[in-house]
Image (cartoon, rainbow, N blue to C red):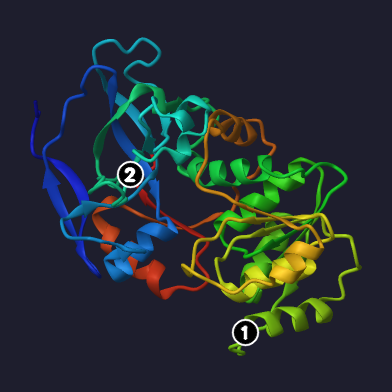
C-alpha cells in the first residue's frame, strides 16, 4: 500500500549518475515502522558507488537509493509493534539479517550470509535511506535520548563500527594504541579507545586532518606520514617504522582504518610482539603483508566488518557526553542538494563527515 508519490529519494543509476526522484511513500508492514528521515551521513562506500558504480566485484545494474547512516522520527507504526510509537526519534541500524543461521544465533549477525544491508548490492539491490521516508523493522530502530540531535544520531552508525572494532581487541586503560587514518572512522576509534583510558597516536598523510584530530581529541598524539612513493610496500613500511622511532614493544594495538597496502604493512611493523592489528579500512582486495613478522612476533591480525549488538552502547557514549561529536560534521546539505553534496565529497580532501537532511 502507498500513500502518495512525494518521497524524494537519491537514486544512483551508474558511475557519477546520481538523480533525485520521487517514489511512493510506503506504509509499514507488520513489525515495521515508517520513519521520516532527518539526517544521513555520506559513507565511504556510498562515495565509492558514486565514483565507480560498483563496490568490489558487485556492479550496479539497476538504480539504487544510497545512504545508510541515518536517523529520523517515526510517522507510522505497523501492526504488532509495541516498543515504538509515533513521534519517537530513532537511529536506524541498516542491516537486516536472517536471524536463523548459525552466525545470527551466535550473535554475530553482521556476518550473516543473507544480510540485506542498506545501499549495498550484496544479494541484489538493497535500497538505502537517503530519502524522505523509509520503512524499517522495529528491532533495528534504536530510540534516541532527548538530549541528542539528529546530527549526532546520524553519526551513531559509523560510531558503531568503531565500538565494535575496539571491543574485538584487548584495549584498556594500560594500552598504547596507534590509529592509522584520521578520517571519521579513525577519529571515532581513537575516541572510543580514549574512553577506555588508552594512550592513542593518530597517523595520517594529511596534516589538516591531523590538526583536526588534535583539536577533537586533545590528549592524543599525532604523526604525519609521507605519501608513499615506492612500489615496494614492505620496504616503505619498514623504513617508516624505523623513522617513527616508536619504542620497541610499546604499541599494543594498531587500528588500520585506510585499507591501503603500505599502511597495513606499517601496522605489522609497529605493533609489539604479541600485539593486535585490527583491519577496519577496506581498500585494495589483495595486498602484500610481512608474514615473517606476523608469524615470528605472534601478531594477531583481525578483521572487522560493520558491527553487531553495539548501537545502544554507541548511543549511550554520545548521550552521556563520553564521546563528543563536535566538529565531526564539516558540511551539511538539504536533501534537494544531495547531488551537490556528493560532488563536494568527491572534490574535498579536508571534509570530515558530510551529512544530508533537514536536521529538524
The disc, 1 or 2, on the residue closer to the chain's N-terminal end is 2
The image quarter in which residue 15 lies: bottom left
Disc 2 is placed on an element classified as loop
Disc 1 is placed on an element classified as loop
**Quadrant location of the N terminus?**
top left
Say if residue 106 shows up in the picture: yes
Residue at image coords 12%, 47% = 22
Rendering coords of residue 255 (x, y %): 67, 57
Rendering coords of residue 40 (x, y %): 38, 47
Residue at image coords 67%, 61% = 213
Q: Which residue is mark 1?
A: 228
Left or right of residue 197, residue 335 in this image: left
Contact (Cβ within 8 Å) of mark 1 with mark 2: no
Rendering coords of residue 118 (x, y %): 33, 44
Residue at image coords 29%, 18% = 31
The image quarter in which residue 59 lies: bottom left
In front of the other: 301 or 13: 301
For residue 323, the mark is none
Say if residue 206 shows up in the picture: no
Q: Which residue is mark 2?
A: 118
What is the crowding at mark 1: few (fewer than 14 residues within 10 Å), some, or many (at least 20)? Answer: some
**Quadrant location of the C terminus?**
top left
Amino acid at each position: 500500500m502507498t500513500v502518495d508519490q512525494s518521497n524524494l529519494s537519491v537514486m544512483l543509476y551508474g558511475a557519477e549518475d546520481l538523480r533525485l526522484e520521487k517514489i511512493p511513500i510506503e506504509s509499514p508492514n507488520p513489525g515495521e515502522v515508517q520513519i521520516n528521515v532527518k539526517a544521513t551521513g555520506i559513507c565511504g562506500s556510498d562515495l565509492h558507488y558514486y565514483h565507480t558504480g560498483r563496490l568490489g566485484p558487485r556492479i550496479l545494474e539497476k538504480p539504487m537509493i544510497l545512504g545508510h547512516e541515518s536517523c529520523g522520527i517515526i510517522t507510522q507504526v505497523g501492526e504488532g509493534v509495541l516498543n515504538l510509537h509515533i513521534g519517537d526519534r530513532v537511529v536506524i541500524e541498516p542491516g537486516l539479517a536472517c536471524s536463523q543461521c548459525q552466525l545470527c544465533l551466535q550473535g554475530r549477525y553482521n556476518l550473516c550470509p543473507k544480510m540485506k544491508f542498506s545501499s549495498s548490492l550484496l544479494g541484489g539491490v538493497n535500497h538505502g535511506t537517503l530519502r524522505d521516508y523509509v520503512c524499517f523493522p522495529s528491532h533495528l530502530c534504536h530510540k534516541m535520548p532527548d538530549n541528542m540531535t539528529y546530527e549526532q544520531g546520524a553519526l551513531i552508525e559509523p560510531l558503531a563500527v568503531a565500538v565494535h572494532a575496539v571491543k574485538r581487541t584487548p584495549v584498556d586503560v594500560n594500552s598504547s594504541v596507534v590509529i592509522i587514518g584520521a578520517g571519521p572512522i579513525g577519529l571515532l576509534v581513537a575516541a572510543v579507545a580514549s574512553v577506555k583510558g588508552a594512550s592513542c597516536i593518530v597517523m595520517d598523510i594529511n596534516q589538516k586532518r591531523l590538526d583536526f584530530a588534535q583539536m577533537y581529541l586533545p590528549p592524543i598524539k599525532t604523526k604525519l606520514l609521507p605519501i608513499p612513493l615506492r612500489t615496494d610496500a614492505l620496504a616503505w613500511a619498514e623504513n617508516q617504522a624505523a623513522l617513527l622511532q616508536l619504542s620497541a614493544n610499546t604499541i599494543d594495538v594498531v587500528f588500520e582504518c585506510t585499507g591501503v597496502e603500505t599502511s597495513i604493512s606499517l601496522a605489522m611493523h609497529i605493533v609489539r610482539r604479541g600485539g593486535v592489528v585490527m583491519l577496519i579500512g577496506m581498500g585494495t582486495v589483495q595486498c602484500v603483508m610481512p608474514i615473517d613478522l606476523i608469524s615470528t612476533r605472534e601478531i594477531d591480525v583481525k578483521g572487522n566488518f560493520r558491527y553487531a549488538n553495539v548501537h545502544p552502547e554507541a548511543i549511550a557514549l554520545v548521550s552521556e557526553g563520553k564521546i563528543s561529536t563536535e566538529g565531526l560534521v564539516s558540511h551539511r546539505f538539504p536533501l534537494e542538494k544531495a547531488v551537490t553534496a556528493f560532488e563536494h565529497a568527491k572534490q574535498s580532501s579536508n571534509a570530515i563527515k558530510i551529512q544530508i537532511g533537514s536536521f529538524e
